[in-house]
Image (tube, rainbow, N blue to C red):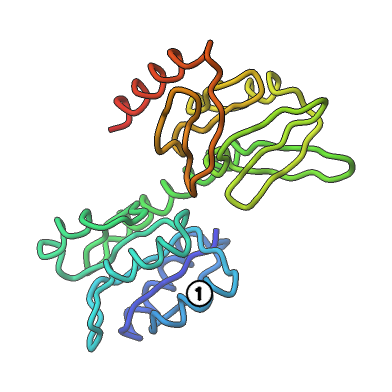
Amino acid sequence: MKVAICDDTPIMLEYVIEQVADICPTYETMPFNKIAELFQAVKDGVVFHVVLMDIEWDGADKDGIDFASELYSLSPKTKIIFITGYPVKYSQQIFLKNINLRGFVSKPIDLNILHNNLDRIRDELSLEESRKLTLKFNNAVISIYPDDILYIESRAHTATVHAIDGGHLCYEKLGDLAKRLPMQFILTHKSFFVNMDKIKLVERERVILEKGMEVPISKARYGQVRDDYFRYVGLNI
């Protein structure tokens, strides 16, 4: 697991690095006392599973909550654990922005709390990894997270998995793929399975997805799609 540790105080930065190393020596840690360097690393392609983010940054016009929100736009899967010496001051503010928040640790750091937060994230990552969909086409094999799939289209003897990073061909029937998908996917047409988390609008003949993508709804499926989608949204509010 790759962990970024962000704090503007060198002594605290070194302390947290040592504690994380003691908790799990196999974690790969990278320290940052300048947020710009963290953002540059992410832009350069470094993928952090979790960021331990101090909230107060001396001399900055933003705080760690703002930085975590900006990081979310660059790397939405990165999980955040806030660390602060002012838990009462920030306990409500941490929920006001779009952040992949997974923990909140007060200073002085309770090592058991930090350990439990990191263990929980490790377990979440293991579960996410187990849910990956493995696709084969010719001699290529790729794995993709179901949450990254927009929709799946079947044509002839192949299926195209349309994901956030583009389309992926595979030799598999749509029905067989469907058996390996979580419950958030719905059949809108005999040739299309759609990720309901990516739906923006349901119309009579189509669903509108993120980035304006359109997927058809067959006449026979419209009522079921509409009912299943609104039921799903209701359960996830």
Residue 175 vs residue 206: left or right? right
Provide the secondary structure element on which disc 1 rests.
strand
* Residue that sits furthest to the top in the current view: 220
| In the depicted structure, whether residue 35 falls above or below residue 168 | below
Quarter that holds the C terminus:
top left
Pointer 1 local density, CA inside 10 Å: few below 14, some 14–19, many at least 20:
some
Instruction: Tell me residue 94's x, y (percent).
Output: 22, 58
Q: Nearest the camera: 52 or 78? A: 78
Residue 155 vs residue 103: left or right? right
* Residue positioned 52% across, 23% down in the render: 186
Instruction: Tell me residue 107's x, y (percent).
Output: 22, 68
Residue 171 vs residue 208: left or right? right
Residue 237 vs residue 197: left or right? left
* Residue that sits furthest to the right in the current view: 139
| In the depicted structure, whether residue 184 falls above or below residue 108 | above
Instruction: Tell me residue 210's x, y (percent).
Output: 47, 45
| In the depicted structure, whether residue 181 falls above or below residue 170 | above
Q: Quadrant of residue 79?
A: bottom left
| Residue type of the residue flagged with mark 1 | Met
* Residue positioned 34% across, 28% down in the render: 233
Q: Nearest the camera: 203 or 226? A: 203
Q: How many marks?
A: 1
Q: Quadrant of residue 226?
A: top left
* Residue positioned 55% across, 58% down in the render: 1
* Residue that sits furthest to the bottom in the current view: 59
Instruction: Tell me residue 96's x, y (percent).
Output: 21, 56
Q: Which residue is mark 1?
A: 30
